[in-house]
């Protein structure tokens, strides 16, 4: 299990862990866990993986929607769910958090979600 310490701009530190099985979430697997608040992040669906990878390379919502055969609002909804899941406020922070938790590949372009984080 990989332990990470996340430091916010205000200087506060939070611990997070990469994939684990959490007994407290009814058997749902988690991406990371904020131990200070106890909120775990669930693994990503195939659709969320494609959206996160698109956001990571800077693809617009309209292009993502067309490529995934979804409405623009559908893509925005899924991104909003991931923003809450990763406990971040915007897309840049979402990509940054995904990188820091080891969800996205490092040293490769375009970034890809690692298979261990796929539901």
Image (cartoon, helix red, strand yellow):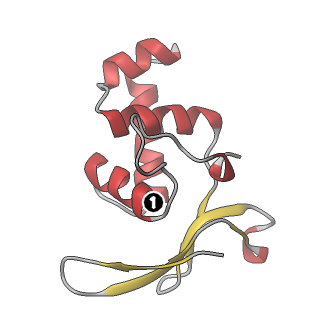
Residue 98 in the image: state x and y as whole percent: 44, 56
Using residue 2 as the reference point, say whether residue 109 is left or right of it.
left
Can you name the residue that lies furthest to the left here? 10
Quick check: 9 left or right of 28? left
- Residue 64 vertical placement versus 103 (above, below): above
View extreme (front): residue: 107
User: Which residue is disc 1 drawn over?
Assistant: 86
Looking at the figure, which quarter contains the N terminus?
bottom right
Quadrant in which residue 45 is drawn: top right
The residue under the point 38% across, 60% down is 97
Quadrant in which residue 71 is drawn = top left
Residue drawn at point x = 26 percent, y = 49 percent: 92
> Residue 35, position in %: x, y?
52, 84
Q: How many marks?
A: 1
Image: 106 above or below 4: above
Residue name at image x 52 percent, y 31 percent: 50
């Amino acid at each position: 299990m990989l332990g990470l310490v996340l430091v916010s701009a205000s200087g506060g530190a939070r611990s997070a862990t990469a994939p684990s099985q959490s007994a407290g979430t009814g058997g749902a697997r988690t991406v990371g866990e904020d131990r200070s608040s106890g909120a775990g992040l669930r693994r990503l669906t195939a659709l969320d993986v494609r959206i996160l990878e698109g956001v990571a390379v800077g693809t617009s919502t309209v292009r993502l929607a067309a490529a995934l055969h979804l409405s623009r609002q559908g893509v925005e909804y899924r991104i909003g769910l991931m923003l809450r899941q990763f406990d971040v406020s915007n897309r840049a922070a979402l990509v940054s958090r995904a990188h820091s938790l080891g969800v996205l590949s490092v040293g490769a372009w375009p970034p890809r979600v690692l298979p261990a984080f796929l539901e």
